[in-house]
Image: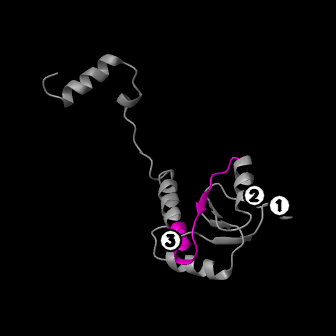
Amino acid sequence: MNLVLLGPTDRSLVVALEDALADTRRPPRDIVWGWDRPDTPTPALFGEHDLLVVLADTAPADAWREHLIARGLGFAVAQGQGREQVNNIRFAWARHARSQAGQRPEIRPRYISACDNCADPECEHRLFRLNKPGL
């Protein structure tokens, strides 16, 4: 999972984000930046699990929003300047990393019992009666 910054930025924001995300449970594999405008000659290719962040206080923010919406890509918008912007991106990354972790196959349930696949209502009622006294 990469963190992709969309909009004009400089190395100082990237360094601040690297510092802020270094101690997180799931840091980004890479922080990708340098995509100033969506109409650049080389089209931006984003991975399925990447977090795309539109830098809101930049001139092409609206163009990026339109570009991503037209392609059906999800994204976050980072408001603010300096430390506030770094914190907003850090919070967006934490939310994104948690949502992606829930989709990993090794976290999904490994066992589905026959009762979970059974379509017999009597079987289900017997199961409930076992767990709830008085039924």
- Highlighted range, magenta: 72-90
Determine the CA span between mark 1 and mark 2: 9 Å
Q: Earlier in the sequence, mark 1 or mark 2?
A: 1
9 with respect to 113 (left or right): right
Check disc 2 and give the amino acid type: Ala
Residue in the image at 74% along x and 63% along y: 60
Q: Which residue is mark 2?
A: 63
Check disc 3 and give the amino acid type: Asn
Determine the CA span between mark 1 and mark 3: 28 Å
Quadrant assignment, res 34: bottom right
The answer to whether the residues at label 1 and label 2 have Cβ atoms under 8 Å apart is yes
Vertical order, 130 against 50 (above or below)? above
Question: Where residue 37 sits: x, y (%)?
Answer: 78, 65
Disc number for residue 39? 1
44 with respect to 11 (left or right): right
Residue in the image at 39% along x and 41% along y: 111
Asked if the magenta segment contains residue 17, the reply would be no
Q: Which residue is mark 3?
A: 87
Q: Earlier in the sequence, mark 2 or mark 3?
A: 2
Quadrant assignment, res 116: top left
Asked if the magenta segment contains residue 79, the reply would be yes
Label 1: which secondary element: loop
Residue 112 showing in the rendered view = yes
Check disc 1 and give the amino acid type: Asp
Label 3: which secondary element: helix
Determine the CA span between mark 2 and mark 3: 24 Å
Q: Earlier in the sequence, mark 1 or mark 3?
A: 1
Q: Looking at the image, which is closer to me, 65 or 42? A: 65
Q: What is the tally of numbered marks visible in this picture?
A: 3
Image quadrant containing the N terminus:
bottom right
